[in-house]
């Protein structure tokens, strides 16, 4: 008796889906079957949107955010404040900051954070372009480090602080403390320590 | 100030990914960004495998399992036993049964299970083709209902039993009871009830 398995094209599709972040072997099978069998599925639209996005979207050469041939939403906007530069880890960090309405300057996406375990060293991040942006500025700018508060985010912030100090910029870092709407009983010790250290006089 | 968002092609890709089963809006964004930015990502291969699978894979007109132009692994195998027909809900149910090695007959995939809440009625399932297969058989066959033990699986089994009884076939249903390797302390009441009802004399 021959062994029964998915036809080769289905196996290839499952293999590609399995490579996506957060998709395990069983989810990949489930998604592949849904894509091929559900009347609601639009696999060719998905295939098309993948090709179009891959072919049209590039990181902006200035800030690293997503850009197309028609330009970059952030860098091309003349109404933004050139004197404030917000450094984030990933291009995706730009959107939550924009949605919060907390910032109206320019961005610089590093493309990651320092992490010896994942073999991410300073040369892998867009740090040299950041230095060039700061040094080519016509007036002194404020550089806000909006990096995560995990170990790698801390390490990246410390590294950047060390190499940017002394250059023609003011440095700051976004605050750590209690998240909005959170009571003290739900905060962990380190968050409370940071909140206490960062206290402001009233 | 203009509002900043993903470029249109990225938004379209996120929209398509969000439609996949088990993928929420945040996962869709994460997968899209990974696909466009990670050096390990192969979005064009994924796009290609989607098109190829969609264009080449069809349900087998006999059993409903996945088939290509070159045929169906199950139906085309002359060494399988024509006298046993295993009825499953989904084409995907064939693989676990095959892997278990418990069955060497033919399959019939219903394409779903009866579920009034999801508006799945008998006409939506491949029940008429099942009846035709049974009636066109040259000798009496055994029909094994290998349906789930949830409410819809039970309802589907009861419905099939009612309409197949009296036709030229023997009917059976796979056993319900303790899962292999499971102790009584982990079994729920209904499983224990079924296990007790299905007890076999030794």
Image (cartoon, coloured by chain):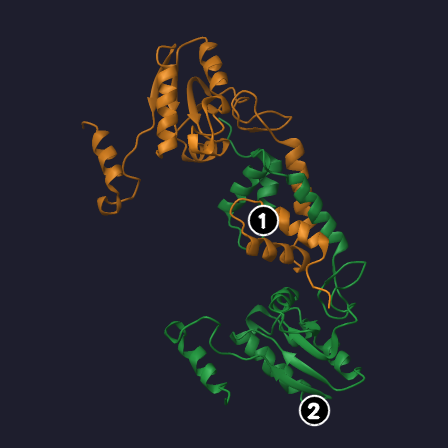
Chain colours: A orange, B green
| Callout count | 2
Q: Please give the residue where the numbered disc 2 appears in the rendered image.
A: B166
Question: Quick check: B80 above or below A99?
Answer: below
Question: Quick check: A133 above or below A108?
Answer: above
Question: Quick check: B60 above or below B13?
Answer: below
Q: Please give the residue where the numbered disc 1 appears in the rendered image.
A: A18
Q: Is residue A148 visible?
A: no
Q: Is residue B59 visible?
A: yes
Q: Mark 1 and mark 2 in contact (Cβ < 8 Å)? A: no
How many residues crowd mark 2 within 10 Å: few (<14), some (14–19), many (20+)? few
- Residue at the limit of the structure toward the top, as seen here: A138
Is residue A108 left or right of A188 when viewed as pictured? right
Q: Chain of mark 2?
A: B
Is residue B113 left or right of A162 when viewed as pictured? right
Image-quadrant location for residue A194:
top left
Residue A20, percent across and down? 56, 45
Residue A122, percent across and down? 45, 22
For image coordinates 55% across by 78% down, the residue present is B154
Image-quadrant location for residue B37:
top right
Q: Nearer the viewer, residue B40 or A57?
A: B40
Q: Secondary structure at mark 2?
A: loop
Q: Nearer the viewer, residue B117 or B189?
A: B189
Is residue B52 left or right of A120 when viewed as pictured? right
Question: Quick check: A109 above or below B87?
Answer: above
For image coordinates 76% across by 54% down, the residue present is B56
How many residues crowd mark 1 within 10 Å: few (<14), some (14–19), many (20+)? some
């Amino acid at each position: 008796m021959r062994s029964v398995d998915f036809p080769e094209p289905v196996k290839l599709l499952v293999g590609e889906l399995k490579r996506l972040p957060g998709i395990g072997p069983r989810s990949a099978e489930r998604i592949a079957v849904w894509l091929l069998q559900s009347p609601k599925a639009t696999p060719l639209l998905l295939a098309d949107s993948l090709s179009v996005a891959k072919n049209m979207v590039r990181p902006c050469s200035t800030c690293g955010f997503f850009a197309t041939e028609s330009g970059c939403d952030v860098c091309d906007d003349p109404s933004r404040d050139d004197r404030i530069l917000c450094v984030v880890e990933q291009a995706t960090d730009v959107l939550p900051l924009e949605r919060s309405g907390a910032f109206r300057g320019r961005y610089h996406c590093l493309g990651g954070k320092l992490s010896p375990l994942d073999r991410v060293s300073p040369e892998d991040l867009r740090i040299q372009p950041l230095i060039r942006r700061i040094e080519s500025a016509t007036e002194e700018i404020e550089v806000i480090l909006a990096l995560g508060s995990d170990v790698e985010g801390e390490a990246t912030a410390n590294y950047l602080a060390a190499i940017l100090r002394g250059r023609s910029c003011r440095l700051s870092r976004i605050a750590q403390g209690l998240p909005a709407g959170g009571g003290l009983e739900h905060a962990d010790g380190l968050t409370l320590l940071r909140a206490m250290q960062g206290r402001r006089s009233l």
